[in-house]
Amino acid sequence: MAALVELRDVVKHFPVGRSLGEIVRGKHPAVRALDGVSFDVGSGDAVAVVGESGCGKTTLGRLMLKLVEPTAGSIAFDGTALAGLAGESLRGFRRQAQLVFQNPFDALNPRFTIYRAVAEPLLNAGIDKSEHMDRVASAFRRVHLPDLDRYLDKYPHQLSGGQLQRVVLARALVLAPRFLVADEPVSMLDVSVRAGILALMREIRDAMGLSAIYISHDLALVRYLCERTLVMYLGRIVEDGPTREIVRRPLHPYTRALVAAVPVPDADQLRQPLPIKGNVPDAREPPSGCSFRDRCPYAMPRCSAETPQLRPAAGGHHVACHLD
Amino acid sequence: MILEVDGLEIHYDTRAGGAREVVRAVDGASFAVPEGRIVGLVGESGCGKTTAVRAIMGVLAENGRQAGGRVVFKGEALDEAATRKLRWRDIAYVPQSAMSSLDPVYTVGAQLVEVLTKRGNESGRAARARAAELFDLVGLSESRLADYPHQFSGGMRQRAAIAMALALKPSLLLADEPVTALDVIVQRQILDMLRDLQQRLKLSMVLVTHDISVVAYLCDDVVVMYAGQVIESGPVREVLARPRHPYTMGLRNAFPDLMSDALELVPISGSPPDLSDPPPGCRFAPRCPFALSACMTGSAMVARGSDRTHLSACLRDDEADLLRKAALDPATWLRSSNFATS
């Protein structure tokens, strides 16, 4: 099946403030938020993007929605390059690709009623007002807020976190999109409520045949959402594979450290020392070759000379590492 | 016991739409911290865990007051004057946002020295020596004392915040969500450091968190709070492996576990009660799949238990083993969803 979203060698650099020395020497330092990322999202697929803060995962999501432009490389949606979209074709793309915000408490305008918040995308897309109520009602049914009248005239502060996150989802679904990018969609919610939202997102995806990207720092959570996971480190994908495989048999030394560091709710767990050293290096000046090499317990001379590319490995993984 | 909290009641006076209201943020909470142990105080937002430690520390918000109960530290019941004397010297506190509350215009070292001279009345010279010692203790290089907060990573700022709390050599450390905003690898490094500090300095610790995985990794004992009350407490291994209160059972099911084979998390439907007007009886009863009509009346249960270490505040505690088995079935938790939507 053809991919819905295709990324090829996508690079995104953000210029940063220059020091006096850098100005004198004519240097233009940049944070390399993304440094050559390629992958496909198939129709109906759910892909998790995990990594620590600063790894580029949020930038990746924003690029896929054309909220920022890549420095180099190409992104295509349904066979059409995003770079060429403008006017009506851009509006068409905006209807089909939606963002689900991280923090439901910030995502809605506090002075808009719930109805206005959910109907706003319809207004922006130029859909006739006579259709708004029906579409809002159907989006509310999808997120299991059936008694519409209880919510529509309320304001965000009158709703609980779980209800708000359902409203944020309804707003993302009201245009019946084909592609969702959800950036940490449940990280602000309490545990007992979070589980319900995760189940809801899976149900919606299956029912609407959506493709989705879930961006998260939490490997333990995405396990319940996505069959496939990409692990990012300093602007690159270091491992890509079936989520279960990545959790059970991580191949890249960074993924191994990440999996080992995730705490589990079991007091009898093995407490092994972390197989990693130091901290994430400065994204303005990552190490040459493999950017993980100075923290890697297995680093060898080749790792500083040659940047490892993603290659197929056991268990359906792809891994960017020189180790066999 | 280095610390005993006995029937603690903390009320906040608020105005909701002009009407005066009293929010019972902590409503009869009792728990104890044995010497040299790390106790996890766990629960969801609004359960009263942060208010409880702020009350122990004597740093409640202005509209908060202790309406009942007592806090006993090393055998002495604390009043305001006693708390002020002990604060920072014997009982120290790492507030929730400590790592982001460092002053951006002073070096981290200057801020640490200020803590030592102002709170500890140390001379400048002694304070500078002690600051270097403290940095070493929390795994920061002495040379970083001259850095400004923006030159520190999140993990380093959290280490600095912990160094400040430990400045006057307290015997009890209260830490509120010390690893919450950190990435997992940094989180693990800070948790390992806390355990190491506890052992080297013979500290006792209370760790406030919403994360039962953090409790499982670090803590010896756990106190589970719900709607201002302690509903279960005991040794971590016991409570997580054999929870006796239905809320703890539900929390266990709802919590992601990287290593389990389960494909679904099971939510607890509904939401916690309004603490300005809490329901009679057990506060979890409206969300509990095992609630009987007797659970919805009378006053709330106080945690109890036959072995005196693992306590649970449930009317059906005698049937805990049966309930735990039923709680493992996701269908059990669908039943209570008739009452409310979260």
Image: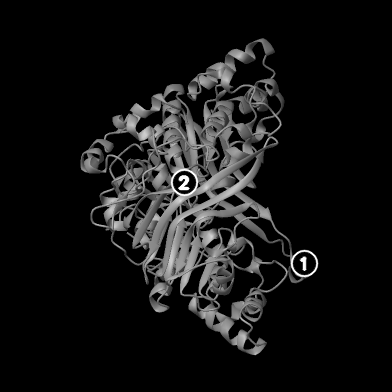
Between B150 and A88, which is closer to the camera in this rendering? Answer: B150
User: Which-is-in-front pick, marks 1 and 2?
Assistant: 2
Q: SS at mark 1?
A: helix
Q: Is residue A202 left or right of residue B97?
A: left
Say whether residue A259 is visible.
Answer: no
Using the rendered view, name the quadrant where residue A61 is placed.
top right
Q: Chain of mark 2?
A: B
Instruction: Give the alpha-carbon distance from disc 1 to disc 2, as whole Å.
Output: 50 Å
Q: Could you say where residue B161 lies in the image, as x and y percent from the top left?
A: 57, 68
Q: Is residue B72 left or right of residue B222?
A: right
Q: SS at mark 2?
A: loop
Amino acid under disc 1? Ile
Amino acid under disc 2? Glu
- Which residue is pictured at 60% across the width and 48% down the height? B12
- Which residue is pictured at 37% across the width and 38% down the height? A227
Q: Chain of mark 1?
A: A
Between B335 and B146, which is closer to the camera in this rendering? Answer: B335
The residue indicated by pointer 2 is B44
